[in-house]
Image: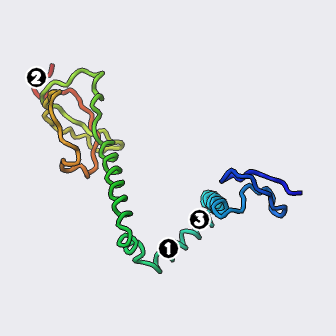
C-alpha cells in the first residue's frame, strides 16, 4: 500500500518509500538537502567525535587552499561591500552599548557642577584609587557630534560610579 505523507520541508504530499522508516521528507533535491542539513546540525550539537572530525577536515582543507578567501573577495566585490556595510552596523551597535544612557540619572538628584571623585567599579579590584574629575553641566540644547568621529572609542571602557564627595565645600 502506498501511504501519503506531507513533506516537513516543502509541505507537499508525497508517496512514502516502504523501505524507509519514518520518512518525513520527499525526494526533491531541496528537501533532501534540508534533511541532511538538519541531521548535520543535530550531529554537530550532540556528537563530540563528529564535531572534532569536521573541524579537522576544515583545517586540512584550509591548509590545502590558503588563498581561497583572498581570491573569493577579489572575484566578488559585492560580497565585500555588503560585509563592509554590515560591519559598520555591528560597530555602531557595539559603540552604542558602551555609551551612557541619557536618562540613567533621572531618579537621582541632578548633578551639581564641581569636582567629584570617580571610583572604578570592578570586581576583585586590588586598589581603590579615586580619580578626580571636573564635571560641567551640559545644557539641553547642546548639539553633540556622532560617536564615530570621537577619538578613543575603540578602547575598552571602564564603568565608573559617581560619588558625591565634592573636593571643596561639600554640601
Residue 43 seen anywhere in this rendered image of the structure: no
- Secondary structure of the residue carrying numbered label 2: loop
- Contact between marks 2 and 3 (CB within 8 A): the answer is no
Say whether marks 1 and 3 touch (CB < 8 Å): no
Q: Quadrant of the N terminus?
A: bottom right
Neighbor class of circle 3 (other Cα within 10 Å; few <14, some 14-19, many 20+) is some
| Residue 166, image x, y percentages | 15, 27
Q: CA distance from mark 2 to mark 1?
A: 66 Å
On residue 51, the disc is 3
**Residue furthest to the left:** 168
Residue at (31% x, 42% y) in the render? 96
Calculate the distance from the C-alpha at mark 1 to the C-alpha at mark 3. 12 Å
Label 2: how many residues lie within 10 Å, few (<14), some (14-19) or many (20+)?
Answer: few
**Label 1 crowd bin: few (<14), some (14–19), many (20+), radius 10 Å:** few
Q: Residue at x 19, y 25 (%)?
A: 111
* Colour mode of the rendering: rainbow
Residue 133 picture location, percent across and down: 15, 36
Which mark sits nearer the N-terminus, 2 or 3? Answer: 3
Q: Quadrant of the C terminus?
A: top left
**N-term-proximal mark, 2 vs 1:** 1
Point out the frontmost of discs 2 and 3: 3
Q: Nearer the viewer, mark 2 or mark 1?
A: 1
- The residue that label 2 is drawn on is 169
Q: Please identify the quarter of the rendering in which residue 147 is found.
A: top left
Residue ID for mark 1: 59
Amino acid at each position: 500500500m502506498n501511504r501519503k505523507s506531507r513533506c516537513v520541508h516543502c509541505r507537499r504530499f508525497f508517496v512514502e518509500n516502504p523501505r524507509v522508516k519514518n520518512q518525513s521528507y520527499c525526494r526533491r533535491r531541496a528537501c533532501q538537502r534540508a534533511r541532511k542539513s538538519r541531521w548535520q546540525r543535530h550531529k554537530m550539537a550532540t556528537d563530540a567525535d563528529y564535531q572534532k572530525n569536521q573541524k579537522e577536515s576544515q583545517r586540512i582543507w584550509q591548509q590545502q587552499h590558503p588563498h581561497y578567501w583572498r581570491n573569493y573577495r577579489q572575484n566578488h566585490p559585492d560580497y565585500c561591500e555588503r560585509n563592509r556595510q554590515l560591519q559598520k552596523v555591528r560597530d555602531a551597535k557595539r559603540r552604542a552599548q558602551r555609551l551612557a544612557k541619557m536618562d540613567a540619572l533621572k531618579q537621582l538628584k541632578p548633578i551639581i557642577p564641581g569636582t567629584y571623585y570617580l571610583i572604578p567599579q570592578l570586581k576583585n579590584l586590588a586598589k581603590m584609587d579615586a580619580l578626580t574629575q571636573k564635571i560641567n553641566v551640559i545644557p539641553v540644547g547642546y548639539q553633540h557630534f556622532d560617536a564615530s568621529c570621537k577619538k578613543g572609542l575603540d578602547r575598552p571602557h571602564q564603568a565608573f560610579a559617581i560619588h558625591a564627595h565634592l573636593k571643596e565645600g561639600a554640601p
